[in-house]
Image (cartoon, rainbow, N blue to C red):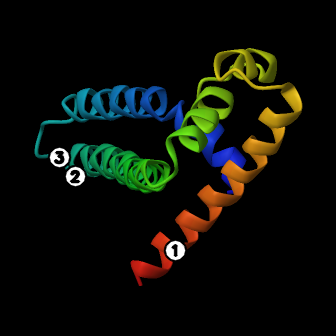
């Protein structure tokens, strides 16, 4: 996933995780319907548990990725972090962002480009330091 898509995804992770938790609960409820010792119930129960575990693993991966982005964002200058959060994560329009940080639209786009490049560099550094 490229850096811009990651930032746009970042703000939706809480919704994704909440939906995943709902799906896990549904699989657990379904598993409770298969409580007898019959072979069929055991197989159905195991299928439900397996599906819930897959969703849990996906959620764990989302949390890990979100933490990596958070760490990289926190390594940026306050201005670069603010620009990326306003524009990509919170979805503010460029004109609103430039008004908030009191700069021209051209200056905002220049700073935004530098902020994305800096975030990419920080994420790359973090990825290499984890090897």
Element on which disc 3 rests:
loop
Q: In which quarter of the image is residue 106?
A: top right
Element on which disc 1 rests:
helix
Residue drawn at point x = 38 percent, y = 51 percent: 67
Is 31 displayed left or right of 128 in the figure? left
Which residue was labeled with disc 3?
38
Residue 115, visible in the rendered structure: yes
Q: Which of marks 1 and 2 is nearer the N terminus?
A: 2
Instruction: Give the residue furthest to the bottom.
Output: 131
* Mark 1: few/some/many CA within 10 Å (<14, 14-19, 20+): few
Point out residue 90 in the picture as x, y percentages from the top left corner: 60, 24
Residue drawn at point x = 82 percent, y = 36 percent: 107
Point out residue 66 in the picture as x, y percentages from the top left corner: 44, 48
Which residue was labeled with disc 2?
39
Q: In which quarter of the image is residue 91?
A: top right
Marks 1 and 2 close (CB-CB < 8 Å): no
Quadrant for the C terminus in the image: bottom left
Point out residue 25 in the picture as x, y percentages from the top left corner: 28, 29
Which residue was labeled with disc 1?
125
Question: Which residue is at the front of the view, 113 or 7?
Answer: 113
Question: Which residue is at the front of the view, 119 or 52?
Answer: 119
* Mark 3: few/some/many CA within 10 Å (<14, 14-19, 20+): few
Residue 2, visible in the rendered structure: no
Cα separation between marks 1 and 2: 51 Å
> Of discs 1 and 2, which sits in the foreground?
1
Cα separation between marks 3 and 2: 4 Å
Point out residue 127 in the picture as x, y percentages from the top left corner: 49, 73
Question: Which residue is at the front of the view, 9 or 112?
Answer: 112
Question: Which residue is at the front of the view, 5 or 25?
Answer: 5
Marks 3 and 2 close (CB-CB < 8 Å): yes
């Amino acid at each position: 996933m490229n850096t811009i898509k990651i930032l746009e995804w970042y703000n939706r992770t809480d919704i994704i995780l909440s939906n995943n938790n709902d799906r896990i609960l549904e699989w657990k409820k379904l598993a409770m319907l298969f409580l007898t010792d019959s072979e069929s119930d055991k197989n159905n129960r195991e299928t439900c548990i397996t599906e819930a575990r897959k969703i849990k693993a996906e959620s764990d991966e989302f949390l890990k990725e979100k933490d990596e982005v958070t760490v990289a964002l926190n390594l940026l200058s306050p201005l670069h972090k603010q620009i990326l959060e306003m524009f990509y994560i919170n979805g503010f329009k460029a004109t609103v962002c430039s008004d908030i940080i009191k700069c021209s639209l051209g200056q905002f786009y220049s700073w935004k480009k530098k902020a994305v490049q800096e975030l990419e560099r920080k994420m790359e550094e973090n990825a290499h330091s984890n090897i």
